[in-house]
Image: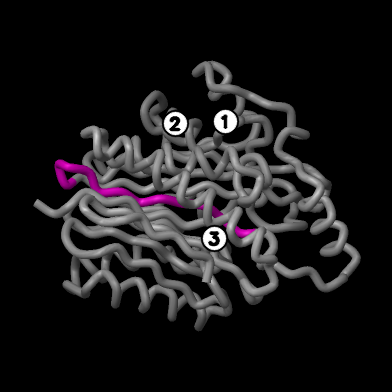
Amino acid sequence: MEPFALVIHGGAMVGPSSSLTESARQERIAALHESLRRGFELLAGGGTALDAAIRAVMVMEDCPLFNAGRGAVLAANGTVEMDAAVMDGETDRCGGVSAVMTIKNPILAARAVMDYSPHSLLCARGAESFARDQGLELADNSYFQTEERRQALEEALTGKRFEAARSLGTVGAVARDKNGNLAAATSTGGLTGKLPGRVSDSSIAGAGTWAVNGVCALSCTGTGDVFIRNATARDVACLVEYKGMPLSAAIRTGLDKVAKAGGTGGMIGLGPQGPAIMDYNTDAMSRGFRQDGAEPFATIF
């Protein structure tokens, strides 16, 4: 039996991570370690890969340092609209929400869509109404907004140079539990200055999130519209499943296709066997990994 494991990302970054102060870098690395700790606790206690991936993502949604949940970037109209998705490799089922504005933890709403609805993706007011019916915690949109994100929007809208490395991107987690089951979870605030109602790859199974037992679990970050057009997560899984390509090579192939189409980004992945994969074609990617019997690892470079 392969050791149980958890891999996380806090987003691919365009712009050198050296633009972060040392204190800011350490603060973000500490947040990654907390995400790993909370998710890995579940795996070590015999919990499922799905529960562990969701818990790890929730930690980052609750942290204002990441572009998900509290701290998500602002759309062009000054509001926060969030997307999230989960996929359970054991059942091949998925759930997602998109363009939600009041759900405190969108990743929990994505799971509720998977578990308690006949659908795979709910959007906007319909998703929020469903979350309310499921008893999920709601928050005013102002809860998600931070001064840093307001400043980033202002700079983006006025055409000033703004360093994307300061606003770490989409968050995600993939996990392998003691029974060998795989799962993936992804959450994002999308793009600074995006059009209201824009849907990201993070909420779409096969674009930014994928997990199937015996194949792989994947979570993506980057130029979401390119990931959607390339069905990147599903494409990578197909390279593994049907061509027998090693997961590391399949992820690199997927990122090369994204680059050829004019996008950038990164991807984390786990297979039923083998090590964690954390690859990107940007300047840096916030990421971390923990496996049974090994010390946790987290970095931003």
Give residue 158's quadrant in the image: bottom right
Report crowding for label 3: few under 14, some 14 to 19, many 20 or more residues within 10 A (C-alpha). Answer: many
Q: Is residue 206 among what the camera can see?
A: no
* Residue 283 image position (x, y, % from top left): 57, 77
Which label sits in the foreground, 3 or 1?
Answer: 3
* Residue 20 image position (x, y, % from top left): 68, 67
Tell which residue pokes out farthest to the bottom in this image.
260
Circle 2/circle 1 CB separation < 8 Å: yes
What's the distance in space between the residues labelled 3 and 1, CA to CA?
24 Å
Q: Is residue 247 left or right of residue 26?
A: left
Q: Earlier in the sequence, mark 2 or mark 1?
A: 2
Residue type beneath disc 1? Ala
Q: Is residue 136 among what the camera can see?
A: yes
Q: Is residue 244 above or below residue 116?
A: below
What's the distance in space between the residues labelled 3 and 2, CA to CA?
24 Å
Picture residue at 46% right of the left edge, 45% below the top = 35
* Residue 221 image position (x, y, % from top left): 51, 61
Tag 1 residue: 127
Give residue 273's quadrant in the image: bottom left
Picture residue at 39% right of the left edge, 73% below the top = 254
Tag 2 residue: 113
Q: Under tag 2, what secondary structure?
A: helix
Residue type beneath disc 3? Gly
Q: Earlier in the sequence, mark 3 or mark 1?
A: 3
What's the distance in space between the residues labelled 2 and 1, CA to CA?
8 Å
Q: Which mark is residue 66?
A: none
Tag 3 residue: 11
Q: Is residue 110 above or below residue 214?
A: above
Q: Which residues are magenta?
A: 168-180
